[in-house]
Every structure is written in structure tokens, then in C-alpha cells.
Image (cartoon, rainbow, N blue to C red):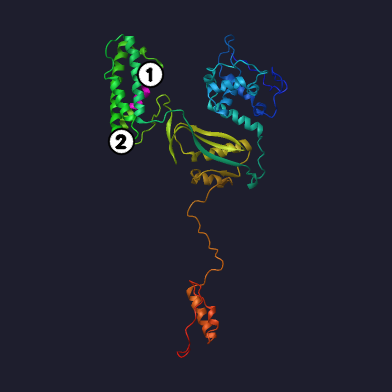
């Protein structure tokens, strides 16, 4: 049973330091602790404990659980580094809700896994919305409408959070599946007390064929395709061996984790066989990691990194706060999130944004119509052919016809040709002497 702790924030003066001194009120962790929505964090955390009976281990407070996740995300730490930071830093312990500095670790390292399960992505978004609401109260909507009601700027963009996986190749993925199958076969054969050769092939030869191609700096496509086909054949043989052992030992011989791993391996085998049969055909929900089968390749088309592997995020930025509007491991068109993001902006502020700054992919016909209806300025040029720029030449050169006319007038006005030097060539601007009027003239 979880009991909610005191929601009042301890002042800086009340935090006890055994080695003397006092915390600074200008520290970033102290400022963040003052605005943190502790009541919202407590309510979300308490809902995850369904057991109302008293007794058992006392749960770790909500501020410690959420604060550890905040420190990890803010500093981009690992779980080990997060625990070390919370143990050594008095400002971190003040942020976690402690009343005095303690030398021992505030929690066990394995609890970081449970903290992530307690706070889902929806819970983090709810806490973020509450934090923004308290620091930015909504504005009253304008009376009578009009363009004066649109205030603020909404920035929209999308990115991919890279997953911690090895860069996937078809050959390495098939080899990893084969090695996992061999470990499962070894465990089952020991239980069945089978002696002698268990696999339907020689393990060393299969591994040597993989290394022969994998160690090449630039292997030929035909060699890679041949090696993938060989590894796929090994997977099919291992599936038959596992089925035989399961029949002998019973269905309970495999654990739930092994069943999930074998299911993923069969999916990888089916996808790779489809790819070998038709390389040009796109594979739906393609698996690129055996340990993280939910990760998908996200084609971005950027220079140097055309394909990324991780979770795609569509986010909006308002007054320095970043809100994640859509997140998914499957690729999606971020242009469809503009209307939803603008409606969330209206729910927070009570008015529509004055301008939306977004990439070209957001400037669809529906989004433009939505922005025009609500008098929102959307960044970027208009649809259609751009207008031609007007020429602004100052002192343009005279044409050949005008120059010839000027030369004729000058020659007619001065028989002696004194005024003829006023005529210039339109190309070289070199003064030209006109021809004499009389053949006998010098």
C-alpha cells in the first residue's frame, strides 16, 4: 500500500548539510523543485499500486522515482551514472525530496526499471502539461473574435530518437537468430538427456561461413545473398529440431521468454525469405533487432543518414517548452499533426497562434485551409507557380535603334561633324566619327 508523502516543498534553508554551508537558491535543481507539480506526480504514482492491504515493503516515494527519471533524461545518463549522481550531489537529493544529505544510495540500481514502468509516456505528457499550465496560465479569449485574438508562435518539427541497437544487416541478423536457436537447443537437449550430435549441421562450419562474408570490407552482393540463404536454411533445420525436443519434453519445456524469442525468429525467417525471393518488394513491419523487435527502420532521406532506427517523434515547441504530440516506432507523415497541435495550443492558451513555423511537409492543402480559416500565418511560400520578379534597372543602355536615330540627328544638325562625337556605339561605347557628307571632303 502506497501512502502519499508531504507535498510541501522544503526550503533551501531547512535542508541540512552535515559538512556545513547552505544550498544556493539559484541552482537549477532548486528552481526546478519549486515549480514541479508534486501533487500530480503523487496521484499518478499512487494509481499504480492496486494493493490496499497494509504490510510488506514500503514503496519508494513518488518524488524519488520521478526525480530519478528526470535526472536521467536531463543529463543523458545511464542508470548507473544516475544513481551515482543522486548519491554524490546534495542538489540532486534536494530535488528528490530529501530533508538532509545522506551518503548511502537513495535506492537500489534495479529500481530504475520499475520507475520506468510506473511512469508511462502518457503520464510524462500529463505532468508536462500540468507544469506548463502552472507556469503559463491560459489567456482569456478575445471578445468578438478578430485577428487580435491570435497570439504566440507554434513551432512544429519531427525527429527520430535513435535506439540502442547494432546497425542491422540481413546477414548479422540471421546469424544472431541461429546462435539463439542453438542455445535453446542446448538447454532442451540437456533436459532430455540426449547424447551425441544434437544439431542437424556442424556449428563451426555455419559460423565460419558467416565470418567468411562478414569480415570482408566490401563483399559482393552475390556472396551476401548466398550467405543469407545458407543461414536461413540453418534456421529451418533448427526449428525442426526444437519441435522434436518440445514433443519429447512437453509444451512447458519452453519458458515464456523463449517462446517469444522463437516467435520473433520465425518472423525474421519469413521476412528474409520474402526478401531473398523478391528484393524490390517492401517488407511490412520489418524487424531489424532480435532483442528489440518493435524497432522499425525510419526512412528520413537526410544526407549521410538516409535511414534511422528508433522511435519517431512529432513535437511542438511553445515558449521554450517541448510537447511530444505523436510518438511511434512506425513511420508516419508528420504533416497530419498540424491541426491537432494547433488545437492543443488553443486549449492551453485560449487563443490560436499568430504564426506556425514548420517545414514544407506541413504545408498541405488541408493545413493551409485550416490556417486560413483561423487567421494563422503559416510559414513558407504560397502554393502554385511563384510570381516573376519585376526588373528594376536604373539607367539601362539604349537600344540599337535609338542609338542610330541619335547619330542621324547629330549628323544632320552639324554638317561639319562637330556634334557627331555625341553618338556612341551601344556595345563598346567608343565614339565613332561619321562619314563625310561630300566625296571631296578630307
Q: Which mark is residue 221?
A: 2
* Residue lying furthest bottom: 440
Label 2 vs 1, first from the N-terminus? 2
Secondary structure of residue under mark 2: helix
Q: Nearer the viewer, residue 299 or 305?
A: 305
Does the magenta segment cover residue 267? yes
Residue 140 drawn at (x, y percent): 67, 39
Q: Quadrant of residue 36?
A: top right
Q: Residues within 10 Å of mark 2 (few under 14, many from 20)?
A: few
Part of the protein shown in magenta: 257-269
Q: Quadrant of residue 133?
A: top right
Q: Is residue 6 above or below residue 283?
A: above
Instruction: Give residue 270's mark.
Output: none
User: Where residue 29 sits in the image (x, y, percent)?
Assistant: 64, 27
Gap in Å between the C-alphas at discs 2 and 1?
33 Å
Q: Is residue 235 magenta?
A: no
Q: Nearer the viewer, mark 2 or mark 1?
A: 2
Judge whether 119 appears above or below 339 on screen: above
List x then y, in percent, for residue 206: 29, 23
Above or below, 291 relative to 223: above
Residue at the extreme front? 442
What label sits on residue 259 in the rendered view? Answer: 1
Amino acid at each position: 500500500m502506497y501512502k502519499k508523502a508531504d507535498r510541501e516543498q522544503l526550503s533551501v534553508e531547512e535542508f541540512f548539510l552535515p559538512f556545513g554551508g547552505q544550498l544556493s537558491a539559484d541552482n537549477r535543481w532548486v528552481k526546478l523543485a519549486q515549480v514541479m507539480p508534486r501533487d500530480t506526480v503523487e496521484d499518478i504514482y499512487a494509481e499504480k499500486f492496486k494493493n490496499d492491504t497494509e504490510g510488506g515493503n514500503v514503496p519508494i516515494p513518488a518524488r524519488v522515482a520521478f526525480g530519478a527519471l528526470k535526472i536521467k533524461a536531463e543529463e543523458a545518463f545511464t542508470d548507473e551514472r544516475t544513481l551515482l549522481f543522486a548519491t554524490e550531489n546534495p542538489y540532486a537529493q534536494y530535488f528528490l525530496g530529501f530533508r538532509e544529505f545522506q551518503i548511502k544510495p537513495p535506492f537500489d540500481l534495479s529500481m530504475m526499471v520499475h520507475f520506468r514502468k510506473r511512469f508511462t509516456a502518457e503520464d510524462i505528457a500529463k505532468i508536462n502539461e500540468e507544469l506548463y499550465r502552472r507556469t503559463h496560465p491560459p489567456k482569456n479569449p478575445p471578445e468578438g473574435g478578430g485577428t487580435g485574438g491570435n497570439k504566440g508562435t507554434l513551432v512544429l518539427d519531427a525527429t527520430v530518437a535513435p535506439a540502442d541497437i547494432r546497425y542491422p544487416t540481413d546477414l548479422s541478423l540471421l546469424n544472431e537468430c541461429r546462435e539463439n536457436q542453438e542455445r535453446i537447443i542446448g538447454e532442451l537437449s540437456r533436459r532430455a538427456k540426449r547424447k551425441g550430435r544434437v544439431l542437424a549441421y556442424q556449428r563451426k562450419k555455419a559460423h565460419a561461413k558467416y565470418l567468411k562474408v562478414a569480415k570482408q570490407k566490401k563483399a559482393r552482393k552475390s556472396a551476401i545473398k548466398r550467405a543469407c540463404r545458407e543461414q536461413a536454411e540453418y534456421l529451418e533445420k533448427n526449428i525442426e529440431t526444437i519441435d522434436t525436443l518440445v514433443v519429447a519434453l512437453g509444451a512447458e519445456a519452453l519458458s515464456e521468454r523463449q517462446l517469444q524469442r522463437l516467435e520473433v525468429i520465425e518472423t525474421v525467417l519469413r521476412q528474409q525469405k520474402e526478401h531473398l525471393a523478391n528484393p524490390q518488394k517492401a517488407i511490412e513491419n520489418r524487424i531489424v533487432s532480435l532483442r528489440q523487435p518493435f524497432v522499425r527502420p525510419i526512412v528520413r532521406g537526410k544526407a549521410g543518414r538516409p535511414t534511422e532506427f528508433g522511435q519517431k517523434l512529432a513535437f511542438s515547441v511553445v515558449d521554450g517548452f517541448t510537447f511530444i504530440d505523436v510518438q511511434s516506432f512506425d513511420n508516419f507523415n508528420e504533416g497530419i499533426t498540424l491541426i491537432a497541435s494547433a488545437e492543443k495550443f488553443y486549449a492551453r492558451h485560449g487563443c490560436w497562434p499568430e504564426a506556425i513555423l514548420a517545414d514544407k511537409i506541413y504545408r498541405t492543402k488541408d493545413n493551409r485551409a485550416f490556417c486560413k480559416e483561423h487567421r494563422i500565418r503559416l510559414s513558407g511560400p504560397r502554393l502554385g507557380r511563384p510570381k516573376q520578379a519585376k526588373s528594376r534597372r536604373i539607367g539601362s543602355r539604349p537600344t540599337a535603334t535609338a542609338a542610330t536615330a541619335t547619330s542621324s540627328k547629330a549628323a544632320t544638325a552639324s554638317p561639319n561633324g562637330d556634334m557627331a562625337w555625341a553618338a556612341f556605339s551601344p556595345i563598346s561605347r567608343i565614339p565613332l566619327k561619321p562619314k563625310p557628307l561630300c566625296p571631296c571632303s578630307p
